[in-house]
Image: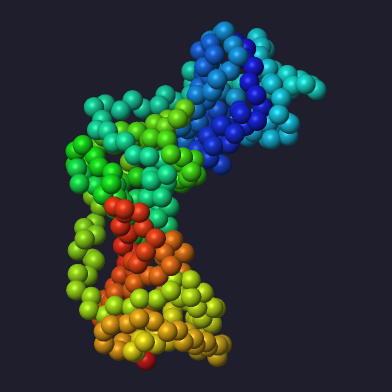
Amino acid sequence: MKFIVSSTYLLKQLQVLGGVINSSNTLPILDNFLFELDSSQLTVSASDLETTMASTLDVESDSKGSVAIPARLLLDTLKTFPEQPLTFVVEENNTVEISSNHGKYALAYADGNEFPKAIALEDPSKTVITGDVLATAISKTIFAAGNDDLRPVMSGVFFQFSTEGLTFVATDAHKLVKYTREDVTANQVAEFIMPKKPLNLLKGILAASEDDVTIEYNESNAKFTFENSVLICRLIDGKYPNYEAVIPKENPNKLVIDRNQFLNSVRRVSIFSNKTTHQIRLKIAGAELNISAEDIDYSNKAEERLTCDYQGDDMQIGFNSRFLTEMLNNLNADNVQLEMSMPNRAGILTPVDGLDEGEHITMLVMPVMLNN
């Protein structure tokens, strides 16, 4: 088995695949990339048993075979090469020899047949979405997903597909984000919960891609096919909480404010907040928003005044500044609207502008009790 490939082209593909590999694996074979050669097509795979990703590369070759090559060693070696063709030859003595312009390097390999096979999806449903739309949907929601091992369903992003549109939801019980696209539809109703790791991989790869991504899914697995790559992952098992029930429908108090100004103010004031609660207080009256924070233990406090457009009763409400900052950071709007009903009910943050046609985003943040 022998093939010739460009060093930078190979490195670029392997760096993406390297994101799949865990730092400590239960099975030693998972520390390797699986190289499967079929004449001029080389398929490289990486897996952690839950997520498997494979990319197909064009190489110069007329042989066939499969070997598992140590991932970390190969990546570290490739990073040091300038652009040049590399020749890989699988030798009889269980080593792969790589020849560059300047030298030769031998790596021990494992038998490719030991590598776990990717799951074949039986009878999947299918949806096609462009890469940048999927990447946006992921990045707008994934930050709100939880990290609680006791509630695994909340540690992923909920995909809801229908003939009317696609909805992506993430929540950790303190904050919730619902992102909807009406300009993209599925041919049938389906819902599943995607884990974070494969989503982060997809987000990184598809950020600026306008190519189509085919999503196939059944009860237990999902498969994403794009350009020359395939990603298959196991879905999170369980029923997603009824998120619609948490979103308050009647919110008579509406505040519209410049996003950047609001974000910078919250950031500054929160430096003076209590280090465990991160609590900031919003006091709204007329066209004035007063943002304050206090850390009684250290006698630190801060207060800022902003002008805003407000319709509703005068009110005071407390929020965790970290959640508010994250949400404001994830919106691209110039102006945002914060809707509230009462100081003990969730606030709803939506962008006033900056959305595409058919794109909707709703962010919900739970208040914190103010100690007056």
Depicted 212 relative to depicted 107: above or below: below
* In-front residue for pair 40/69: 40
224 vs 246: above or below: above
Image-based side of 267 in relation to 103, left or right:
left
The picture places residue 273, in percent across and down from the top left corner, at 50, 81
Residue shown at the point (80%, 22%) measured from the top left: 102
In terms of depth relative to the viewer, which is nearer, 360 or 40? 360
Residue 345 horizontal side relative to residue 113, left or right: left
**Marker count (numbered):** 0
Q: Residue 90 in the image: x percent, y percent?
A: 64, 14
Q: Is residue 249 left or right of residue 221?
A: left
Residue 175 location, quadrant = bottom left
Residue depicted at x 24% and y 33%: 125
Residue for point 56% across, 29% down: 32
Question: Which image quarter: residue 132?
Answer: top left
Q: Position of residue 96 (x, y in %)?
A: 66, 18
Q: Is residue 270 something that shows in the picture?
A: no
Q: x and y percent of residue 228 in the render? A: 47, 27
User: 123 and 312: which one is in front?
Assistant: 312
* 239, above or below 56, in the image: below
